[in-house]
Each structure stands twice: as C-alpha cells, then as structure tokens.
Image (cartoon, helix red, strand yellow):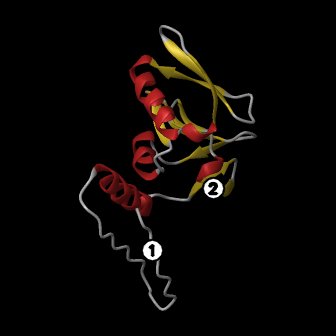
Amino acid sequence: MKIKATIDSSLEETEIIIHAPANEQIHKICQLLQEKNKMISTLKVYKGITEYYMEVPRILFFETEGRQVNAHTAEHIYITRYRLYELERLLPQNFMRISKSTILNTEKIFSLTHSLSNSLVQLQDSYKQVYVSRKYYKELRKKLEERK
C-alpha cells in the first residue's frame, strides 16, 4: 500500500481522497477516518465549582454513581454532565462499555483477571480498578487482541 499526502495550507477544510481497490482494509481505514472526524479531543468536566477541560486520553474510565457520571483519571474524579450513552457516541474507539454503568479507556488497561461472574481490570499508573461484566468480556478481549 502506498500513502501519499499533499499538504496545502491554503485549504480551509481537510479533504482526503483514497484511490484503492475495494477491500476490507480500505473500508476499515475509511470508517476510522470518518469516526475520528466526529470524536471529541477534550471534555468539559467539573470538580466542585471549578470547570476543567480534560484531554480525553487522560481519562481512565467513566462510571455512573447514582444519577451522575464520574470521569476518573489516575489522580482525581471529576463529574461530567453527559450520560453514558452520549459518551459512547462522542468518545474515540479505544473507549468501550464494559458494564451497564462503566465505559473504559482500553488503552489504559494494565491487567485483566478473569472469573466466572465478572473480570477485574487493573489500570496503568493507578490503584483504580473496574469490573467487566460477562456480557462485555468477549468484546473486550477481542478489542485487546486487535490492539496487538
């Protein structure tokens, strides 16, 4: 596969043209580019009365607690005004739902311990851990295998 990029600073909007035979790899590339275009890179979160603009890759996972959604980083917990179903649409592909109440950044997984009812995920550079329900375990394993 050859890749050619022409950089033109006079253009106001990015245009990507792909000339290729139809195959699965090209369809995946196009799909990723379209999804990436829709994704957010920062997220407005709150801690007390302070509003923060958090870089999405810093977030380890999102978790519901009562009626609010918390965004967990390695150091802190922030509140977001989005619902989990809204976050699923907005976040990049490395985020995935792992239970009814949790969305996980799969790039931050350190270890995965499997058991019959659910599996424990330990996160990089953090003491925090979350559980993957049986319903989502196979999908998470598949995503981790793709990451290799």
Q: Residue at x 63, y 56 (%)?
A: 55
Q: Where is residue 50 in the image (x, y as percent from the top left)?
A: 70, 55
- Could you say which is closer to the camera, residue 65 or residue 142? 142
In the picture, residue 79 is in which quadrant? top right
Determine which residue is flagged by label 1.
Answer: 4
* Tag 2 secondary structure: strand
Instruction: Farthest residue to the top: give it.
Output: 116
**What is the quadrant of the N terminus in the image?**
bottom left
Q: Residue at x 63, y 38 (%)?
A: 108
Label 1 Cα crowd, 10 Å radius (few <14 / some 14-19 / many 20+): few
Label 2 Cα crowd, 10 Å radius (few <14 / some 14-19 / many 20+): few
Report the disc number at residue 55. 2
* Tag 1 secondary structure: loop
Q: How many labels does the image show?
A: 2
Q: Is residue 3 above or below residue 138?
A: below
Q: Do the residues labelled 2 and 1 touch (CB within 8 Å)?
A: no
First of labels 2, 1 by sequence position: 1
Residue type at mark 1: give it: Lys
Q: In the image, is 36 to the left or to the right of 75?
A: left
Separation of disc 2 and disc 1 at Cα?
Answer: 30 Å
Q: Residue at x 50, y 14 (%)?
A: 118
Residue type at mark 2: give it: Glu
Q: Position of residue 143 (x, y in %)?
A: 46, 35
